[in-house]
Amino acid sequence: MVSDYSSSGSPWITVESFGFARGVPQCATGCLLIDLRGTVLDDPADEPGLRGRDGTDAAAVQHVLASPRAFTVLERACDQARALLDANAAHNLRLRVLVGDEDGRRRAVVVADALGEILTGRGTPAEVVHHHLPAPAQA
């Protein structure tokens, strides 16, 4: 049975980007861990014109999402998150999706943001947290 999460006032899923080199965020039972270190997703750090840019930079985002299997990775992650959320929701537990690459500043950020957008667009409210990016400046 698939639940309707769109009526909730708060996100059912928190998608978190992080870097394995800095440690995996603590997580209890029912978390989904997506390890991007061995994936086919292109890393902006390997492209001379993109070095030093993080996963919030438009050119870096485009570079990662232009990888030949990027949308396959995102679809699989989305399907896994929804399946685990359905299992968690039966016990009134929200879901944490941990998306990691080596440093948590490029591919993990792009995938976490994209996954959050896809899930929210499909009726499952999701928030995104980036553990290894500077906090956005407040206006």
Image: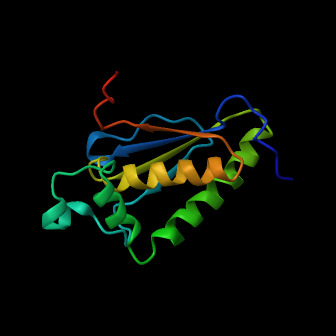
In the figure, 88 relative to 114: above or below? above
Dividing the picture into quarters, in which one does residue 59 lie?
Answer: bottom left
Give the number of marks: 0
Q: In this view, does 5 lie to the left or right of 1?
A: left
Q: Is residue 116 left or right of residue 109?
A: right
In the figure, 127 relative to 80: above or below? above
**Image position, residue 112 (x, y; %):** 46, 49
Farthest-out residue, left: 48
**Image position, residue 103 (x, y; %):** 26, 48
Dividing the picture into quarters, in which one does residue 43 lie?
Answer: bottom left
Which residue is rendered at x = 81% and y = 44% of the image? 4
Of residues 139 and 48, the one nearer the viewer is 139
Of residues 39 and 123, the one nearer the viewer is 123
Farthest-out residue, right: 1
Which residue is rendered at x = 51% and y = 36% of the image? 27
Which residue is rendered at x = 32% and y = 51% of the image? 55
Q: Is residue 128 left or right of residue 64?
A: right
**Image position, residue 53 (x, y; %):** 21, 51
The C terminus, quarter of image: top left
Q: In this view, does 111 lie to the left or right of 132?
A: right
